[in-house]
Amino acid sequence: MSQRSSPIGTVWDVRPILEPRSIALIGASRHPNSVGYLLLENLLLGGYTGVIYPVNPHAHAIRGIRAYPSVEALPETVELAIIAVPAPAVASVLETCGRIGIHAAIVISAGFKEIGPEGALREAELRRIAQQYGIVLLGPNCLGVMNTDAAIRLNATFGQAMARGGNIGFISQSGALCAAVLDYTRAQGIGLSKVISLGNKAGATELDFLVYLWQDPQTSVIALYIEELSDGRRFLELAQLITSESPPTKPILALKAGRTSAGARAVASHTGSLAGSDELYQALFTQAGILRAETVEDLFEYAVAFANQPLPRGARVAIVTNAGGPGIMAADTCVQHGLEVPTLESLRLRERCHLPEHAAVTNPIDLIADARSERYACVLQTLLEEPSVDALLVLFVPIPTADMEAITEVILQAAQQRRKPILTCFMGVIDVAPAKERLRAAGVPCYDFPEDAARALAAMAQYRRWIERPRTGYRSFPSDAERARQLLAAAPRTPYGFIPEDIAFRVLELYGFPLLPWDTAASPEEAVQKAERLGYPLALKVLSPDVVHKFDIGGVLLNVDSPSAVAAAFERIRSAIAERAPQARFHGVILQRMGQRGVELILGMKRDPQFGPILMAGLGGIYVEVFRDVAFRIAPLRERSAYQMLTSIRSAAVLQGARGQPPADLDAAAECILRLSQLAMEQPQIEELDINPLLVYPKGNGAAVVDVRIAVTAPDSSA
């Protein structure tokens, strides 16, 4: 079967790509340095345990292996076809493979959508053929795959030696980066279980290979290089399962390329202008428990720690060093990345381990330059037994008097106990190289600089917090979804798609949002009449489907506090619109009772084609795009996620009560976020929504919506 079921629905079964028992190499070549030659050479030199059939109509044998003129001439139906022929010929070859029953193919060839419209048409044809014959297809335009499992030994790439065996699975969307990573990991002695170059993703995608690596017993850590995702919402669901929800749970580390903004309609919507590509991926990683790396080096330095050491029970780190400076550097980095460096005076290390008077024993523990292996051994064993320490960072600076070999042995013995993670840093290059190699070969991560080790340990502690986090469910609130749908469908729109504010207010009321008392008026007399019922002071705002930024053209007046002031304010707004926006339709004003002072937040929603509804919450008011102090999440939200949005922003201290101010009503603010999540899921015609500001009052006093803008899609003309 080419497909199989999974917790996220049907996926391609990629086992024939990574575990084939037989391979047809179509495009095998006798010319050194050609792709077809290098592929065959790598299959042979890598020690592939299956059967290889070179296919070349012009060669009797290649590298001493009998060649066949076509796949139809093969003595058996192989499990995998590797295609390395010119792009115009690939579709014909793939169709032949499908016709004779080959259900897995890797297309190495380039010349598809990456070159423009002509290549895109070729790629669409490959996709059609693969679907027709049920072929699980990797590529085109990819480097290939590796499987270091001793039972397979598959190197189906060109130009790369076999990776070292290990337990890190790597998926890359870039073939060039994949090649660089293979070179880097070999040089660093980092072992990989599987390597997958996705290429153009005409068939199998990162989702299919993630499902495979999740269930792969040789893989304990998954590393990703991402440029864009094939299905963001399914990726989120799958990543949550892998990282914490369904055994066997595994950490996922990701390096995301492309941090440019993808905001649309920035003129009209705060959410649209702030929700760029990188913000959306950061929200995805946060909700999925994916640990983000900033560089390729970070990606694999983190992966090595996860692959070889137990997770820390908590965030408390003991730093052991033979030099003060590196210990301070490590301590600073630990604290900056959320770890704790607790004081350890109570351990009485000086007396217990016979440390000299000038050794520091509080943490970092500086054993000083003349420290020998016995001193390291005693301190390390004490720290492994100490319940107030969760992890160890061991730093070493090469000094002529230090017995580096003996100290290395002591660290290895401590690590073999596997009571707590031990990460090391041997500073230097030449003198410490043998020790580093020995530590790494034994599964003890050894870094070049203290900051690298501290960041890797911080990532491990972050993952521990993720898997042990409290789980919450989804809240559902009473609403009139059908009436809201009718209002949105019938509402007039601005050129940007925004509907009148009074209709937006009514939609929020149907979903139970707390609104300040409000009404509309089409004349000064009606405004005065309704003002008496609403109470003073009032805000008056122009009601027009053609005005977006009301303040900018005099369309808002505040603190209107009497009947005569209401009538005058109505006329002033009408005159301002006639003067500054003469083409705008004037439908009257919205009257709204002024709210009490509170913390101003912004809540927003933007519907992304890749991820669906994206929610935003953060510091609101007029400075939202200046400070950009906002957090994003992908709807629907669990209860805990709504609170996390509020506590993760830089101004969270303001909400929690700063400089004598009372704490804000976080429960009320979080409930508004959850109501917005429900609204976004139930009303797919809403493209963008801004609530700005949401006034949040002191704890127990609730919140109130002041302004709202909703943009909707145009009605389907074909309906």
Image: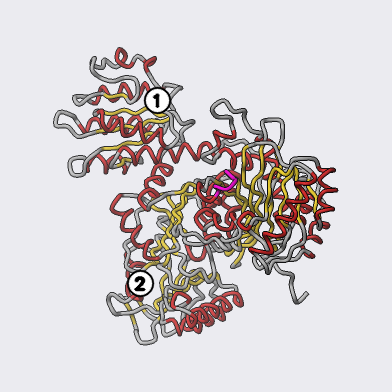
In the rendered image, residue 639, in percent from the top left (x then y), is placed at 67, 41
In the rendered image, residue 255, in percent from the top left (x then y), is placed at 44, 54
For the C terminus, give its image quadrant: bottom right
Judge the density around disc 2: few (<14), some (14-19), many (≥20) Cα neighbours within 10 Å. many
Any magenta on residue 217? no
Any magenta on residue 620? yes
Picture residue at 43% right of the left edge, 50% below the top: 168
In the rendered image, residue 337, in percent from the top left (x then y), is placed at 42, 37
Q: Depth check: 133 or 475 in front?
A: 475
Please, is residue 450 above or below residue 690 in the view? Answer: above
Does residue 402 show up? yes
Picture residue at 66% right of the left edge, 31% below the top: 698
> Residue 513 vs residue 451: left or right?
right
Give the numbered dot on residue 591. Answer: none
Picture residue at 54% right of the left edge, 33% below the top: 653
Q: Depth check: 151 or 684 in front?
A: 684
In the rendered image, residue 213, in percent from the top left (x then y), is placed at 51, 54
Residue that sits furthest to the top in the current view = 351
Residue matched to label 2: 40
For the N terminus, give its image quadrant: bottom right
Please, is residue 278 above or below residue 579 in the view? Answer: above
Q: How many marks?
A: 2
Q: Depth check: 24 or 632 in front?
A: 632
Residue that sits furthest to the bottom in the current view = 58
Magenta highlight range: 618-624
Residue matched to label 1: 384
Q: Quadrant of residue 356?
A: top left
Label 1 to label 2: alpha-carbon separation: 50 Å
